[in-house]
Amino acid sequence: MGKALLVSLIIVLVIGATLALSYLPEGWRQSSSENIPEVPENETAAIETRTFSPNTAKLFITPNDSVIKQTVDNIAKNPIFFDWIEIRDWVAKNIEYVTDSEAYGDSDYWQLPRETLSLRTGDCEDFSVLLCSLLRANGWDDNEVYVVVGENYGRYHAWVKLNVDVVGWQNIEPQEGALNTLVGDSISLSGYTAKYYFNDVYFETI
Ligand SMILES: [Ca+2]
Ligand SMILES: [Ca+2]
Ligand SMILES: [Ca+2]
C-alpha cells in the first residue's frame, strides 16, 4: 500500500471515529465527575472520635482506601492538566458545604473521606481530609501535603497545604479550589492562624 494512501486511510478513520463519538447518546459520554464508584455502606471504618483530636486526626487521612484510589484515578486522568489541579477543583465543584450542626445536630463531626464522597456534603475538615487523602493516593509524599487546622479567636478552620515541586508551597481552600489558592507557605488563611498540621503519617503542633 502506498504511503499517501495509508495516510488518507488513517485520516478517514480518525474523522469517522470522531463523528461516531459525537453522535453517541449523552449517557455514553459520561464525564469523569459522574464516574465515581459507589461507597458500600457497610465498609465505613469504625472511628469512635468524630471531633478534632491530636490522637485520632491521622486516621481520617485514608490514601489506601480502595474507594479513594479508584476515585482519584477517575478524576486525574486528563493528561493536559496537572493532577493536583484536577483533584483540587473536583473537590471544590462536587462537594457541597453543609455545617455539622445542620447535618448531625452536633457542633463538630469529622467524616471519613469515603463518607464525604458518598454524601457529597461536608464542612471545612471534611473537604480538607478528603482532598489530602486524594492527593496522597495520587502519589504526593507524606512531607508534601497536609491538612492544616487554624484558629481565629476560638473559632477553628481547616484547609490543605501542598508542596508543588516547581511552584513551592500552596495553601488551598478546598471549598473554593482555584479561587482561593495562595502561593507560599503562609501560616494564615482567611484570617485563621495555623495551629496544627497533619496527614496519615505526621501530626505536628505549631
Ligand atoms: Ca492529569
Ligand atoms: Ca466541623
Ligand atoms: Ca464535619
Image (cartoon, rainbow, N blue to C red):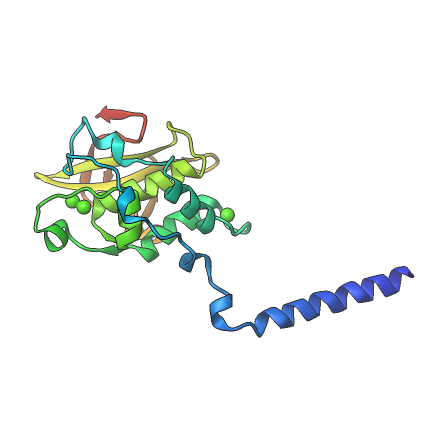
Question: Does residue 99 appear left or right of residue 134 in this picture?
Answer: left
Question: Does residue 138 appear left or right of residue 49 in this picture?
Answer: right
Image quarter of the N terminus: bottom right
Q: Is residue 117 above or below residue 150?
A: below
Q: Nearer the viewer, residue 158 or 34?
A: 34
Q: Nearer the viewer, residue 169 or 74?
A: 74
The reply to whether residue 186 is visible in this rendering is no
x then y, percent, for residue 194: 21, 34
Which residue does the image show at 43% across and 45% down from the upper left?
A: 70
Q: Is residue 137 above or below residue 3?
A: above
Question: Does residue 126 appear left or right of residue 170 in this picture?
Answer: left
The reply to whether residue 31 is visible in this rendering is yes
x then y, percent, for residue 193: 19, 36
x then y, percent, for residue 120: 28, 55
Question: Does residue 197 appear left or right of residue 6 in this picture?
Answer: left
Which residue does the image show at 33% across and 57% down from the upper left?
A: 94
Image quarter of the C terminus: top left
Q: Nearer the viewer, residue 30 or 144?
A: 30
Q: Is residue 149 above or below residue 6?
A: above
- The residue sitting at the front extreme is 42
Can you tell which quarter of the image residue 142 is in? top left
